[in-house]
Every structure is written in structure tokens, then in C-alpha cells.
Image: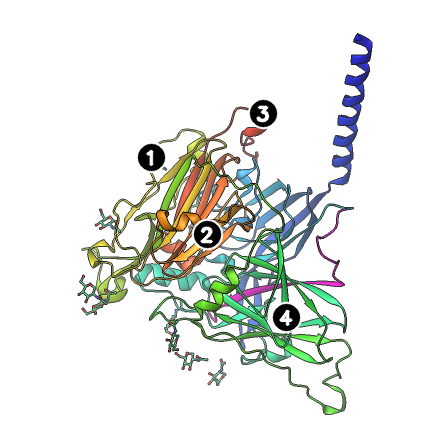
């Protein structure tokens, strides 16, 4: 009996060891070097010294398989502090590699370097990376593609081609100067001068048409477009003339396929779509322009284009023929109905395990604000509406980033005075969030507050837009987690009426939710990743104004339930 037991134990041990071996042999480690540097980039008839990675704009595309490890050495040869965030990567136990400056690390200073190391576990689809320091991500960004493990396949027919489509925003100025000017004056920053597709504005802008991006397709074939909204401050509509798009994934999670003619992505969001070469061989524009939900606010109302070109389309240069691409009709700038219909179509591919019991039921208002002009400020520094300064907050706390240490380091080492764990679970004052809010409620409190979560606690957050200054669609991004979006709606969230509408069967799993203008969204996640995790509006103008907070997630007890020790080369302040 004893010997039989031993044999069984040995057999299981062998199985365990060999499967561990198999996995380890299968997963790859990818080494990359990123050099942050100023590079002359010509757009809109002028050349600017843009900050780039390896001289490329957009930066290099990283391609890996689920389960692989990325090791990226970032060397800063620019004159600004910089950090890189791996947007949507869970960073399970590797919070030191997440990237937001003064949250999980001090910046990589000019002349310095830092190596980010992390493993991708259980995520497949399209993510991206970008600078998380001031407004550098205007030009410092790129795609991060995660394919299934070798031997696994997509849950749809393998497409013939795959094309990343990065939607960006270009200033005919130095974006750092733009945000610095806004911070000085208190006014809204200048809007951008162009949107871009893979770095190019396209045919509708001056001096741009000879560099317009061409996306090839063949009659009868399928192309997987990996669409990323990398714009700094603008939710965008995206459409391809005469072609239907089949959505199959978002934020590196698969969705139930659905067909649409138009996408809307908030900054930070990604959407994977299949497009079929089922139209007459020709040239078709793909185009993106603003979804603008804020009222009376200036915005960049231009349109970026690329060309979907059939390989068999008559060559435009031959015989002096110019085949003008067909232009799609984009929704009106304020077409919230289209956004709502699109957003409600998202469902997880399979049934999922949504937490049903909730340990932490949180309610966070998200919105803008106005600070009265401080006494010692002249009018030049109070150029916001009626002599105020713009601000923004969650639960009336306008988030202040520390300047001399990262919150993660301070929290781990128990250094006081950096973050206080008293971020309110509910708005300090209940009011008609989406109504006519009294001017006396417009000024939030500036502070660095976090909300503590026990390891493995089941969390629900109601994100409620406010109409303070203006209601607006806010793309709220959570670091370190994917979350289920169980419901969205308009007006003030009402637990009595709205809880019954929750989708607890197959809600979409995302890292960024576009909270409806004058409405709300409810998200759920399990706090199984210890560390300090930023949650913020992904419109960079709003994070500049303080629309952010941090979750402080405790370690668990088991060996794999604690954050790893900080890397030896972690930049300190
Ligand atoms: C912002 O726009 C104003 C008006 O066009 C211009 O005078 C100013 O130089 C711009 N600021 C920056 C930093 O480009
Ligand atoms: C193109 O340049 C012309 C002349 O400088 C200018 O009037 C026009 O506004 C520009 N158009 C765009 C789209 O920038
Ligand atoms: C964009 O805005 C400018 C300036 O406000 C305006 O003149 C122009 O008509 C607008 N264009 C579109 C397409 O709405
Ligand atoms: C959208 O804007 C147009 C004017 O450009 C206006 O007539 C219409 O009422 C607006 N629609 C919504 C839903 O706000
Ligand atoms: C600015 O003042 C005007 C006139 O008093 C008022 O109509 C407007 O609502 C104010 N704007 C803001 C944002 O408070
Ligand atoms: C909003 O409330 C203010 C008083 O707080 C009032 O003067 C104003 O008329 C109201 N506006 C609307 C549109 O109800
Ligand atoms: C935010 O806090 C400030 C300071 O206590 C207060 O004046 C303001 O009314 C509060 N606003 C809201 C929306 O709670
Ligand atoms: C750059 O980072 C250091 C901390 O490492 C900080 O003291 C300094 O203020 C930062 N510079 C800017 C311009 O933010």
C-alpha cells in the first residue's frame, strides 16, 4: 500500500514537473531597448523636435504570446523626466514595472535608465504602451500585441493579415509647452491641430497627403484591425467607408462578435475588429474624428484618414488616373445615441465569473471643477471661466501627485505624509450629480488620498459623472486590473432601480470604461493584485487637473500573494 502510494506520488510529481517544464519551455522572454530621444518629425508643413522611442513615431510595436515575459530597458536621452506604462498589462505582483510617475516609481531622469520586467498572464488581444509622465505620451506610444500561446488559436477564423491602427493627436507645438501654459494660466489647454492614424494626419490636412497610411486588403480576405485610441484628450469615432466591422475583442479580452459600421473609443481603449475584402476593388478611406460630449468647450474638429486599398484596385499613378478614395459619413460630433448603442453591444465571449457577493461597495463621482483665484495669483494665472482655474476630482478630492517619492515606495516603507488612506468610499456630500449643481460645490479639495483594499476583496465601484462645469464622457482607466462593466446608464445611479439591470453573466472585461456623459457605469473586480494602483480619467487634461485616485491593495498571506521586491535599478527621486 505504502509503495503504491509512493508510486502515485511520484507519478503526480513527474506530471507536475514535466508540465511546469513544458510551460517554461514554451514561454519566451523578449528583450527590447527603448531610447527616449528628441527626433525631428515633420507634420502639417512644419518640423518639430518630438520626443520619440528609438526615433520612431509611433514607437515600435511589441509582439508577444500570452505567457511570455517582456524585458524592456528604457534609456532616457531626452531633456524631460520620463516613465513608460504598459497600458492594460495586469503587472501581477510586479507593480514596480507599471510606470505612472510618482505612483509606482520616480521618473527616469535625463541620462538615466530603468529596465521594466513583467510577464503577461491570461491576456490576449491588443494593448499598448505609452509615457506616463506629463504630456509626453502625445508622441511616446506604441502597440503591444498579445497573440494566443503557441499552439492555441484565436476564437475566430485566423485572419490573412493584421494591422495595428493607432489613433493619435498632434500639436503643431511642443505638447509639454501646451500643458505648462495651461497649468500656469489655469485655462483649458490649446486643442490639438490634427488627429493621426499610425502617426500620419492623412489627406485632409495640409502637406500630409503624400504620407497618408495605406492599409492593404485583397478581395475575399479578412484583415484584423487592432484599433487603439492613443489620442491625448479626445474620444474618437472610427469608420471605414462601405465596410462593416466585426468586433471580436477589446482591451485584450475577447468579446462575442458583433457587427457595426462605426466604433467609438475613449483614449486608452482598444478594439479588435475583422474587416472583409467584400467590396469592389478600389480605395476606401478609414477615418476618425471627435466624439465631443462636453458642452461649450473648444475641441479639435478635424478628421484623420488612412486608405484601405484593394491590391487589385487600379493603380492611381498609372495613366495619370487618380482614384479618389470613398469617404465614410461619420456620426455628428455629439452623437451620444450612437455611442450608447455601440457600448451596449459589448459582451464577454464566454460566461464569466463576476463577483456576486461584494465586500467593498464604492460610489465615486467623476467630474470637473473650478478653483477660485488664490489671493496671491494675478489675473494672468486665473484664465479659467470667470477668473477661475480649472480643476477636476473624484469624490471631491483633486488628486495631487507626490513630487519627491513614489506612493508605492512610501506605502511599502511606511513613510508618512505622502498618501493618506482616507479616500472617501462615497461622495462627502450627496447632491443632484447630473442636475443644475450650485456654484458653491464646484471647488474640490486638493490631496493625495488612497482607498485601502484587503487582499482578495470583491469590489464594486459606481462611477458617476457630474455636470459640474459640464457633463462629459470620461474614459476611466484602472491600473493593475481588468474589471467587468456590469451596467451603464444616464442620470443619477439609483441602486433600487438600476441594480436589476446588472449583467452578471457575460459583461465585458476591460481596463478602461467610457463613463456615459451625464450618466454612470458600474464596474466589479477582485483585488487579487497587491500594490498601489492608479485609477484616473485617461483624458490627460483631466489627470493634469486631478481626476484620479489610488487603490492601496494589501498583500495576501501566501507566497504568490505579495508584491515582489523592488528591482535594484528602480529609479529613486
Ligand atoms: C496656444 O494657442 C495660442 C492662441 O493660438 C497661442 O498664442 C499660444 O502660443 C499657444 N500655446 C502654445 C504653448 O503653443
Ligand atoms: C492649409 O493652409 C492654408 C493656408 O495656409 C490655411 O488657410 C488652411 O487653414 C490650412 N488647412 C488646414 C486644414 O490646416
Ligand atoms: C471646426 O471649427 C472651426 C472653428 O471653430 C469652424 O470654423 C469649422 O466650421 C468647424 N468645422 C467643422 C467640420 O465642424
Ligand atoms: C448636436 O449638435 C447639434 C448642433 O451641431 C444640435 O442641433 C443638436 O441638438 C445636438 N444634439 C445633442 C444630442 O446634443
Ligand atoms: C460666468 O459668469 C456668467 C455671468 O455671471 C455666468 O452666466 C456663467 O454661468 C459663469 N460661468 C461659470 C462657468 O461659472
Ligand atoms: C440653476 O440654478 C441657479 C441657482 O443655483 C439658477 O439661478 C439657474 O437659473 C438654474 N439654471 C437652470 C437651467 O435651471
Ligand atoms: C468639496 O469640498 C469643498 C471644501 O470642503 C466644499 O466647499 C465643496 O462644496 C465640496 N463639493 C462637493 C461637490 O462636495
Ligand atoms: C524630475 O524628477 C525629479 C525626481 O526624480 C523631480 O525632483 C523633478 O521635479 C522632476 N522634474 C520635473 C520637471 O518634473
Would you say 428 lies left or right of 28 here? left
Q: Which residue is mark 4?
A: 244
Give the number of the mark in front: 2 or 1. Answer: 2
Element type at mark 2 = strand
Element type at mark 1 = loop
Q: Mark 3 and mark 4: span between their CA atoms? A: 48 Å
Would you say 152 lies left or right of 539 here? right
Q: Mark 3 and mark 1: span between their CA atoms? A: 30 Å
Query: Residue 137 or 314: which is nearer the viewer?
Result: 314
Q: Residue at x 32, y 47 (%)?
A: 395
Q: Which residue is mark 1?
A: 417
Ligand 4: quadrant of the figure: bottom left
Query: Is the residue under label 4 in contact with that under label 3 (CB below 8 Å)?
Result: no
> Visible in this render: residue 570?
no
Give the number of the mark in front: 3 or 1. Answer: 3
Magenta stretch in the rendered image: 152-173
Task: Identify the image quadrant of the N terminus.
Answer: top right
Q: Mark 3 and mark 2: span between their CA atoms? A: 35 Å
First in sequence: mark 3 or mark 2? 2
First in sequence: mark 3 or mark 1? 1
Q: Which residue is mark 2?
A: 487
Q: Mark 1 and mark 4: span between their CA atoms? A: 54 Å
First in sequence: mark 1 or mark 4? 4
Give the number of the mark in front: 1 or 4. Answer: 4
Question: Does 516 sit above or below residue 551?
Answer: below
Element type at mark 3 = helix
Query: Is the residue under label 2 in contact with that under label 4 (CB below 8 Å)?
Result: no
Q: Mark 2 and mark 1: span between their CA atoms? A: 37 Å
Amino acid at each position: 500500500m505504502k509503495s503504491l502510494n509512493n508510486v502515485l506520488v511520484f507519478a503526480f510529481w513527474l506530471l507536475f514537473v514535466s508540465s511546469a517544464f513544458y510551460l517554461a519551455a514554451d514561454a519566451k522572454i523578449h528583450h527590447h531597448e527603448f531610447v527616449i530621444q528628441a527626433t525631428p518629425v515633420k507634420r502639417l508643413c512644419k518640423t518639430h523636435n518630438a520626443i520619440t522611442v528609438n526615433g520612431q513615431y509611433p514607437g515600435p510595436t511589441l509582439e508577444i504570446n500570452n505567457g511570455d515575459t517582456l524585458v524592456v530597458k528604457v534609456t532616457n536621452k531626452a531633456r524631460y523626466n520620463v516613465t513608460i506604462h504598459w497600458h492594460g498589462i495586469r503587472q501581477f505582483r510586479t507593480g514596480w514595472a507599471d510606470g505612472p510617475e510618482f505612483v509606482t516609481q520616480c521618473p527616469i531622469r535625463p541620462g538615466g535608465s530603468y529596465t521594466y520586467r513583467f510577464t503577461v498572464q491570461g491576456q490576449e488581444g491588443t494593448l499598448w504602451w505609452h509615457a506616463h509622465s506629463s504630456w509626453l505620451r502625445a508622441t511616446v506610444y506604441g502597440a503591444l500585441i498579445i497573440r494566443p500561446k503557441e499552439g492555441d488559436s484565436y476564437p475566430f477564423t485566423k485572419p490573412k493579415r493584421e494591422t495595428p491602427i493607432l489613433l493619435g493627436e498632434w500639436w503643431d507645438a511642443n505638447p509639454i509647452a501646451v500643458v505648462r501654459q495651461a497649468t500656469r494660466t489655469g485655462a483649458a489647454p490649446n486643442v490639438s491641430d490634427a488627429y493621426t492614424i499610425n502617426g500620419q494626419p492623412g489627406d485632409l490636412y495640409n502637406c500630409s497627403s503624400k504620407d497618408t497610411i495605406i492599409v492593404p486588403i485583397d478581395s475575399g480576405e479578412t484583415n484584423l484591425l487592432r484599433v487603439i485610441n492613443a489620442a491625448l484628450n479626445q474620444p474618437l469615432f472610427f469608420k471605414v467607408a462601405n465596410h462593416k466591422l466585426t468586433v471580436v475583442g477589446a482591451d485584450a479580452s475577447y468579446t462575442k462578435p458583433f457587427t457595426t459600421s462605426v466604433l467609438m473609443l475613449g483614449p486608452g481603449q482598444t478594439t479588435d475588429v475583422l474587416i472583409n475584402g467584400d467590396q469592389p476593388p478600389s480605395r476606401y478611406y478609414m477615418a476618425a474624428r471627435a466624439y465631443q460630449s462636453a458642452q461649450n468647450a473648444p475641441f479639435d474638429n478635424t478628421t484623420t484618414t488612412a486608405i484601405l486599398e484593394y491590391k487589385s484596385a487600379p493603380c492611381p499613378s498609372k495613366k495619370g488616373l487618380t482614384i479618389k478614395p470613398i469617404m465614410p459619413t461619420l456620426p455628428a460630433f455629439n452623437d451620444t445615441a450612437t455611442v450608447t448603442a455601440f457600448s451596449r453591444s459589448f459582451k464577454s465571449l464566454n460566461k464569466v465569473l463576476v463577483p456576486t457577493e461584494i465586500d467593498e461597495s464604492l460610489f465615486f463621482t467623476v467630474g470637473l471643477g473650478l478653483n477660485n483665484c488664490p489671493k496671491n495669483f494675478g489675473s494672468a494665472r486665473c484664465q479659467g471661466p470667470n477668473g477661475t482655474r480649472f480643476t477636476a476630482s473624484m469624490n471631491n478630492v483633486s488628486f495631487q501627485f507626490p513630487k519627491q517619492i513614489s506612493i508605492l515606495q512610501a506605502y511599502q516603507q511606511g513613510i508618512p505624509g505622502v498618501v493618506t488612506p482616507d479616500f472617501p468610499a462615497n461622495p462627502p456630500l450627496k447632491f443632484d450629480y447630473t442636475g443644475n449643481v450650485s456654484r458653491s460645490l464646484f471647488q474640490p479639495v486638493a490631496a493625495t488620498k488612497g482607498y485601502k483594499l484587503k487582499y482578495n476583496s470583491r469590489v464594486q465601484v459606481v462611477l458617476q459623472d457630474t455636470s459640474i462645469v459640464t457633463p462629459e464622457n470620461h474614459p476611466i482607466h484602472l491600473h493593475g486590473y481588468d474589471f467587468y462593466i456590469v451596467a451603464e446608464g444616464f442620470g443619477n445611479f439609483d441602486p433600487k432601480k438600476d441594480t436589476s439591470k446588472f449583467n452578471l453573466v457575460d459583461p465585458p472585461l476591460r481596463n478602461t470604461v467610457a463613463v456615459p456623459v451625464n450618466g454612470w457605469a458600474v464596474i466589479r473586480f477582485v483585488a487579487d493584485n497587491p500594490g498601489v494602483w492608479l485609477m484616473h480619467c485617461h483624458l490627460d487634461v483631466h489627470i493634469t487637473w486631478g481626476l484620479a485616485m489610488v487603490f492601496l491593495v494589501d498583500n495576501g498571506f501566501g507566497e504568490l500573494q505579495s508584491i515582489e521586491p523592488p528591482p535594484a535599478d528602480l529609479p529613486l527621486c
